[in-house]
Each structure stands twice: as C-alpha cells, then as structure tokens.
Amino acid sequence: MNCNGGIIAIATTSTGSRHCGKALNAVRHRRRELPRRLQAKQTKSARRLLKKRRRAEARFATNTNHVIAKQIVTEAERTGNGIALEDLQGIRDRVRLRKPQRVTLHSWSFHQLGAFIAYKAARAGVAVIHVDPAYTSQQCSSCGHVDRGNRLDQASFSCTSCGFAEHADVNAARNIAARGVTGWAVSHAA
C-alpha cells in the first residue's frame, strides 16, 4: 500500500482509494479574498478576525489530515500491508507550478499528514517506509517503462510502450508501493 501526495488528491493508495481535500480547498478558495480586504483595513478588529479565521482553517486542515491518516492506516491494517510514503522533503522547492496551483500546494501540510500516518501506523503495528518519488508519475506500473509522454495530463496515464492505462495517481501509488516493498526487503535483509 502506498500514499502518493498530489495537488488534486491529497493521498492515493495503491489499491485505488483517493483521499481528496476538495472541501478544504473549496473553503480556502472562498475565503481567499476576505483576508485581503481585512488586511487593507489595518484595524484591531480586522486583525482579530484574521487570526480567528486562520485558526479555524488550521483546525479544519488538521482534522482533515487526521481523518485521511486514519483511513489509510485502517486500510493497511485490514489488508495486512505496510505503508510506503513519498519522501516529500523539499517538495516546495522542487515543484514548478503556476500561481493558483502554488497556493494550493503551499497551503497543504504534507509533513503533518505524514506524521499523522506514521504515529497512527506505529500505534496499529503497521510498517511505514519512505521512498524516493523520482519518476513515479512517469513510470508504468505494469512494464516499468519511464517516459515523460506517459503522462497525458494531470489525471491520465497511458504507457507509450505497453499501452497500459490508469489514473495517474493510482499508477504512481503502485510504483511507490513497489519501491516500498523493495526498500523494506533491502533494509531488513541484513
């Protein structure tokens, strides 16, 4: 089982479960204009309201991360699998996106979600391993062929070598799961 973090789906498992943060993204999108107007006022009550809204949004995001982490760990525990997570260290520096997508990427706490998954998995006795996510979205999970042309768009994956087609996040999740199994075998072989 794997968790693949993305912009549209926050986490995707190798079994095909996609956990989306649509509700949170919708809330953030609706509230994006209000802080600008409040900051322009520069009054004490405006600053107080901004602080209150930031805290409410942070609580909502934390709760969403808790719910997603619990679902992932429960599925891993039920199936008897471990969890392979992308090593997202420095993702904000590596990814080049347009401004609206940057706002979405930078406002989500991937580290917090990973930490929640790790502690819930440890409590449930489920193994967790971090793997290098390089080229997992361009690699075919069926034949292993890596090509930039395999990704047709954000959601579609179609292998130019074998013709395998799948949702892009699910394909990447399967690649990360395979790397997790390999990494687990290497780290426990000694």
Image: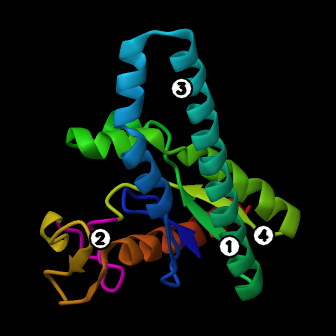
Q: Secondary structure at mark 1?
A: helix
Q: Nearer the viewer, mark 4 or mark 1?
A: 1
First in residue order: circle 2 vs circle 1: 1
**Where does label 3 land, which residue?**
50
**Where does label 1 land, which residue?**
71
Q: Secondary structure at mark 4?
A: loop
Residue 106 vertical position relative to residue 7 in the rendered view, above or below: above
Residue in the picture at 40% in, 13% down: 41
First in residue order: circle 1 vs circle 3: 3
Q: Horizontal placement of 109 versus 92: left or right?
A: right
Q: Residues within 10 Å of mark 2 (few under 14, many from 20)?
A: many
Q: Amino acid at mark 1?
A: Gln
Q: Nearer the viewer, mark 4 or mark 2?
A: 4
Assess whether residue 2 is covered by the magenta stretch: no
Q: CA distance from mark 4 to mark 3?
A: 40 Å
Magenta residues, start to end: 137-147
**Where does label 4 land, which residue?**
126
Q: Amino acid at mark 3?
A: Leu
